[in-house]
Image (cartoon, helix red, strand yellow):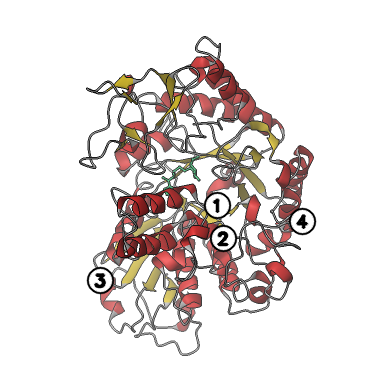
Amino acid sequence: MPSAADLEWWKNSTVYQILTATFKDSNGDGVGDIPGIISKLDYIQSLGMDAIWLCPMYDGPQVDLGYDVSDYQNVYPPYGTLTDMENLIKECHDRKMRIMLDLVISHTSNQHPWFLESKSSKDNAKRDWYIWRPAKHDEDGNRIPPNNWKSVFGEESAWEWDPSTEEYYLHFFTKEQPDLNWEREETRKALFENAIVFWLEKGVDAFRLDAANMYSKPEGLVDAPVTNEGEAYQPATQLCCNGPRIHEYLLEVREVFERYGAVSAGEIPFTCGREEVLPYVSGEGKQLDVVFQFDVVGVGMGGGRKYDVEPRDWTLPDLKSAFSLVQDTLKNSDAWTAIFLESHDQGRSISRFGNDKPEHRVVSGKLLSMMLATLSGTLFVYQGQELGMVNVPDDFPVEEMEDPESGLYYKFIQERSGEDQDEMARAARAVRYLSRFNARMPMAWDGNAEHAGFSSVEPQTKLHPMSGEINVAWQEGDSDSVLSFWKRMLQLRKEHAEVLVHGEFVPLHLDHPSLFVYLKQKEDHKVLVVLNFSEEENADWTDTLDGEFDLDKEDSELLISNLGKDGLNYEVLRPLEGRVYCGK
Ligand code: ISL
């Protein structure tokens, strides 16, 4: 009989997210690959990781870094072969690690044979596998798309005209990523067999469901409300996420997963608050084991447009409320959530939420690791996060930041402003701050090796300019490094899993402008976490306790400080200091 902990392995696990393209190149072609991942599994395990999540490694044109799949059952050749994947699954299991793949089934690539067939004629048997609609016409008789939806990336319509069959198809993301028509049962069945069963048969333990809340489109494909006055196309995310049949579809997906005891972690952007989140992940009819909520990573992003911001335009109370909201998902429910600050879709967390000044970078990376490792849910760590990697520097050429999302935004500002210097500079700041490219640069394995040990040749994606300073080899040999600290925090998380992974989160003084203070509690076990986000000392932090934590001043109660115990003054928190105390 497997133990309860084994059955719910994903709860206590920390999952390491890997982007194959930029993780480790084993065959000297400048692109990361599956054998490269295998060669680093021991490293990943040495950090304290229990599982890996692999971003899409399927074959596809890579218009959106693999989130455009043209063959679910084959590997993108530069990454390797099916045999390499079988080896990877085996090598993970040999180490008692689990493996999670990315499941991209809201859309396919426009090069997928299904779409090519669908596009070939109006009466093709697969025409309805995608979402096709006739044109509309404006007052002057000009052809216009079927509705006003804007694509998630860029400013253009979410509809693309196909001149050969004279209809539009829907693509929520780039025009190379047509949305599948989930209304058709035959399509769903084919998807499940092709994309899910095939891999579960190979022994994959879990899937991360890409855009898991977007499969069901609103009835009648009605216009989105006008939020950007005067613009032709309007954001349709609110309409297209959490659509009318989404839970029904996800239940069907779950049925397939259950046949194999596989775990599902679903990405649910634009889904806010308990009422919207809980139906996915709790109760009898729950469909997902874990949800990725976006409240936290959304802090500091523009409301209308993600990049319409100045860097760091957020306050600590904003970040704390977002975390509270996510932690509240677990309160009085059987729901489960993901804890994460980074992914392939986010800028680096130290630059966004910590402090990336040279004198604060390391300590701030440790502070964020303390925060993440003490919150409830499944913890996800993205490649390079364990090194305290930061965003590109201020002089990094924006034109070189390959990301369809930030690239289209920059182009839009360029055109709208007529290349106005101030506007372009503002957009460049925002792109360097939030672009997904920040997370997509090669892993720095060794500062002394050529190409930072990522590859024996010039990498296809430029190395981060700080790879010489921030890399695995240096940090592994340094007990004060961010990497060594992550190891300690993950160890601590394991030792105190009941309270750190499963405990109730009780925030104290949510409105405090520079301290994040909270309790984690489970039965009579209590832990206090105090995080000073400021560059200043704080001498009155104990006032925030409100008698909620019985702290005697003995050193023995202190589990860890990111500045070490030397020079620790109980009363005074040092700049960017974090501490974890264990209660009685
Ligand atoms: O990244 C976002 C905003 O910057 C999200 O809105 C993101 O677009 C959304 O979470 C869906 O993301 C997923 O599907 C996309 C792909 O580009 C992302 O990399 C993936 O994580 C389309 O497949």
**Judging from the image, what secondary structure is the residue with disc 2 in?**
helix
Marks 1 and 2 in Cβ contact (< 8 Å):
yes
Instruction: Give the amino acid type for the residue marked by disc 1 in the picture.
Output: Asn
Foreground: disc 1 or disc 4: 4
In screen coordinates, is 91 left or right of 555? right
Image coords of residue 330 (percent x, y): 39, 47
- The quadrant in which the N terminus is found is top right
Label 2 crowd bin: few (<14), some (14–19), many (20+), radius 10 Å: some
Identified at 57% across, 73% down, the residue is: 466
Q: Which residue is mark 3?
A: 546
In screen coordinates, is 299 left or right of 71? left
Q: Earlier in the sequence, mark 1 or mark 4?
A: 1
Q: Is residue 66 visible?
A: yes
Q: Earlier in the sequence, mark 1 or mark 2?
A: 1
Label 1 crowd bin: few (<14), some (14–19), many (20+), radius 10 Å: many
**Alpha-carbon distance for marks 2 and 3?**
29 Å
Instruction: Give the amino acid type for the residue marked by disc 4 in the picture.
Output: Ser
Any mark on residue 26, and which?
Answer: 4
Image coords of residue 44 (percent x, y): 66, 59
Label 3 crowd bin: few (<14), some (14–19), many (20+), radius 10 Å: few
Any mark on residue 494, and which?
Answer: 2
Q: Earlier in the sequence, mark 1 or mark 3?
A: 1
Identified at 69% across, 73% down, the residue is: 473
